Image: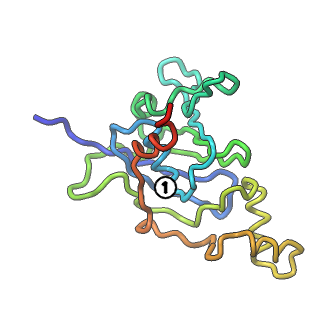
Amino acid sequence: MAARRLTLRFKVTLREVEPPVWRRLEVPDAYTFWDLHVALQDAMGWQDCHLHAFRIREPRIGASVEIGIPDEEGFGPAFLPGWEVPVLAYVREPGQHFEYEYDFGDGWVHDVVLEDIAPRKTGAKYPRCAAGGRACPPEDCGGPPGYELLLAALVDPGHPEHDDFRQWAPEDFDPARFDPAKVRFSSPKRRWQRAFGGR
């Protein structure tokens, strides 16, 4: 008899941004942290053009580990390679929290909570974004403080940086708009091949 196929349901919330930017994400239980990274990028609306890291406590000894893209030169943190680490090696219990940071310069930190482990729904395609709220901030806008400034300037024609930000921000950017049905997920394997295939 075949093993029961399960999904992991996460709630992802962007830290230090109000009103909250959040997503509810369902992924296969066989996912690695690289696979989860790609799904998070797609669900949030990031462009995956900066480094990332998951920070999580090792369940047996309680020590914190970092999972991402190892620095081959050895100058950066000692990341475990995300494509080699199954999510279930570290995340097993509903309610468990961990952190995902994207773009170490801007410092977009996401709080990730495992909400449930459940059987896959018949006919559903995974990964899937089941719900969410508000648009992803534009890339390279300066992290939460820069995004707060951007939002303030966009809504105030009298703001000294209003015209500059109107020209810089994406033309159709609406911070309140998000439709989970419009999320499209890319292949983690193809993303990995594009990034590392020549190595």
SS for dot 1: helix
Task: State the residue in front, 111 or 34.
Answer: 34
Q: Residue at x 39, y 32 (%)?
A: 88
Amino acid type assigned to the residue bearing label 1 in the image: Asp
Left or right: 133 as drawn, with respect to 3:
right
Looking at the image, which residue sits at the far right? 160
Point out residue 80 in the picture as x, y percentages from the top left corner: 53, 26
Task: State the residue in front, 41 or 151.
Answer: 41
Q: Quadrant of the N terminus?
A: top left
Q: Residue at x 66, y 45 (%)?
A: 103
Left or right: 154 as drawn, with respect to 29:
right
Left or right: 93 as drawn, with respect to 63:
left
Q: Residue at x 49, y 62 (%)?
A: 132
Looking at the image, which residue sits at the far top? 61
Q: Residue at x 56, y 33 (%)?
A: 69
Structural crowding at the residue carrying mark 1, measured as other residues with C-alpha within 10 Å and reported as few (<14), some (14–19) or many (≥20)? some
Residue 52: image quadrant is top right
142 above or below 105?
Answer: below
Judging by the rendered image, the residue that carries numbered circle 1 is 42
